[in-house]
Image (cartoon, grey):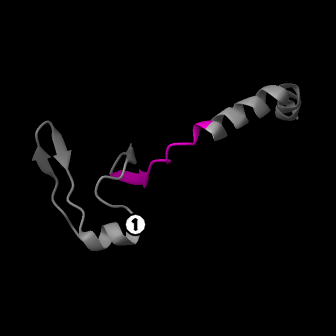
């Protein structure tokens, strides 16, 4: 596990990530990530890609159409 030093860049702290570690993670420069911090650790995961608006509309319609069924299932 490579060791790196945190660096100040403007008003933020930067963590340089070696190219080999990025390749293993599947991340690349410019990717949008989510940062989850807990005492003593930071976890970085890829953010979900933007969803197709047609897909979002389809899900919204299905949720409305079957709302009563979803509510009944949630109560079980």
The residue at the far front in this view is 54
Pointer 1 residue = 25
Where, by quadrant of the figure, is residue 51 drawn? top right
Whether 29 is among the magenta residues is no
Mark 1: secondary structure: helix
Q: Is residue 53 above or below residue 5?
A: above
- Name the residue nearer the viewer: 61 or 48: 61
Residue 42 image position (x, y, % from top left)? 35, 51
Residue drawn at (71%, 36%), measured in percent from left and top? 59
Q: Is residue 65 left or right of residue 26?
A: right
Q: Is residue 38 left or right of residue 18?
A: right
Q: Quadrant of the C terminus?
A: top right
Where, by quadrant of the figure, is residue 64 drawn? top right
- Viewer can see residue 1: no
- Name the residue nearer the viewer: 35 or 22: 22
Q: Quadrant of the N terminus?
A: bottom left
- Viewer can see residue 3: yes
Q: Is residue 47 left or right of residue 22?
A: right
Residue drawn at (37%, 48%), measured in percent from left and top? 32
Residue drawn at (32%, 66%), measured in percent from left and top? 22
Residue 35 image position (x, y, % from top left)? 38, 46
Q: Is residue 51 left or right of residue 62?
A: left
Span highlighted in magenta in the image: 41-53
Residue 45 image position (x, y, % from top left)? 43, 53
- For label 1, count other residues whose C-alpha is less than 10 Å away and answer few (under 14), some (14-19) or many (20+): few
Residue drawn at (40%, 66%), measured in percent from left and top? 25
Whether 43 is among the magenta residues is yes
Q: Is residue 22 above or below residue 75?
A: below
């Amino acid at each position: 596990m490579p060791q790196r030093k945190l660096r100040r860049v403007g008003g933020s702290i930067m963590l340089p990530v070696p190219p080999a570690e990025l390749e293993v993670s599947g991340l690349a420069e410019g990717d949008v990530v989510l940062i989850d911090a807990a005492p003593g650790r930071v976890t970085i995961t890829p953010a979900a890609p933007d969803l197709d608006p047609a897909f979002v509309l389809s899900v919204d319609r299905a949720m409305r159409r079957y709302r009563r069924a979803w509510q009944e299932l949630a109560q079980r």
